[in-house]
Amino acid sequence: MVNPGFVPDNKNIKKTSGTPNLFFDSRDNVFFERDPNNKAYEVTSTQLPAMVGGAFVDLYLTKGHIREPHWHPNAWELDVVVSGEALISIVDPDTKKLHNYIAKPGQVVFIPMAWWHWIRPESEELHLHLFFNNDQFETAEGSDMLRLTPPEVFQLSYGVDSKKIADSLSPVKESVVIGPPTKNPSNNRDHISQNTNRTEPAYNERQNGKAERISININEKPIDF
């Protein structure tokens, strides 16, 4: 068995009895579906064993939904906007800054390995291609971190009220992946209504389809640069 991750050559497919399977329809492997308009398809070496060193996700979102905050412990990610307009947010663990990138069709955003990030549509509909440099990339979802951490740990760590935290996080009963979660978390294929009251962040620039906002919190007050 070949170890997943970057490979410099095609040794895994040489000296075989013939050309390996090189075709797969991504629609045959649904990674996650919130509803018919908010879903993701995935292709890894599970579907194409010869594709060692990389993976692909075809992601569809509509406004009012979000690819929830998460990170990939063993892969970087390259986001390519196919149609629509995306707001891709990344937390830099070195500088402790939040970066927000507005990306339009043909534009790309690179997310280094293990960096916390999330994706929101700025347009009514959004379609992205996501590429990873590991054919069995791993994902740590923010919803899992929140629901599996005992509320008293948040209180001990940050001085917040454990009862309020428990109440606030009560709707999160499983991995969200594409939010917001459904009222019935046991069925992630249920249709959900869009939140039309959400507050959109303001941006300092919108030139040539590119924008970036860096935010930090000082004494619980957000400051934008």
Image (cartoon, grey):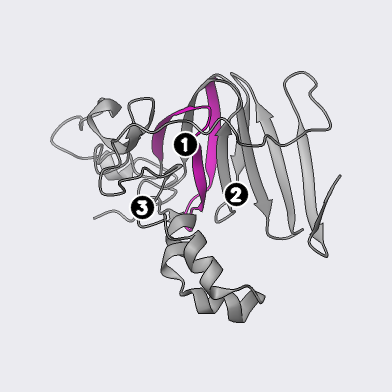
> In front here: 199 or 128?
199
> In front here: 106 or 181?
181
Among the 4 quarters of the image, the one containing residue 25? top left
Label 3 or label 2, whichever comes before in sequence order: 3
Question: Considering only vertical position in the picture, is 196 above or below 72?
Answer: above
Q: Quick check: 120 left or right of 55? A: right
Residue corresponding to mark 3: 4
> In front here: 104 or 193?
193
Instruction: Say if the magenta span includes residue 18.
Output: no
Characterize the local packing of mark 3: few (<14), some (14-19) or many (20 or more) Cα atoms within 10 angstroms: some
Characterize the local packing of mark 2: few (<14), some (14-19) or many (20 or more) Cα atoms within 10 angstroms: some
Q: Which mark is residue 131?
A: 1
Q: Closer to the camera: disc 3 or disc 2?
A: 2
Pinpoint residue 15: horizontal percent, then vertical percent.
21, 40
Residues shaded magenta = 55-82
Q: Is residue 41 visible?
A: no
Badges 3 and 2: C-beta atoms under 8 Å apart?
A: no
Quarter occupied by the N terminus:
bottom left
Question: Considering only vertical position in the picture, is 186 above or below 95?
Answer: above
Residue corresponding to mark 2: 112
* Residue at left offset 22%, top offset 29%: 28
Q: Quick check: 95 left or right of 180? A: right
Residue furthest to the left: 17
Q: What amino acid is labelled 1 in the image?
A: Phe
Q: What amino acid is labelled 2 in the image?
A: Pro
Q: What amino acid is labelled 3 in the image?
A: Pro
Among the 4 quarters of the image, the one containing residue 89? top right
The mark tally for this picture is 3
Label 3 or label 1, whichever comes before in sequence order: 3
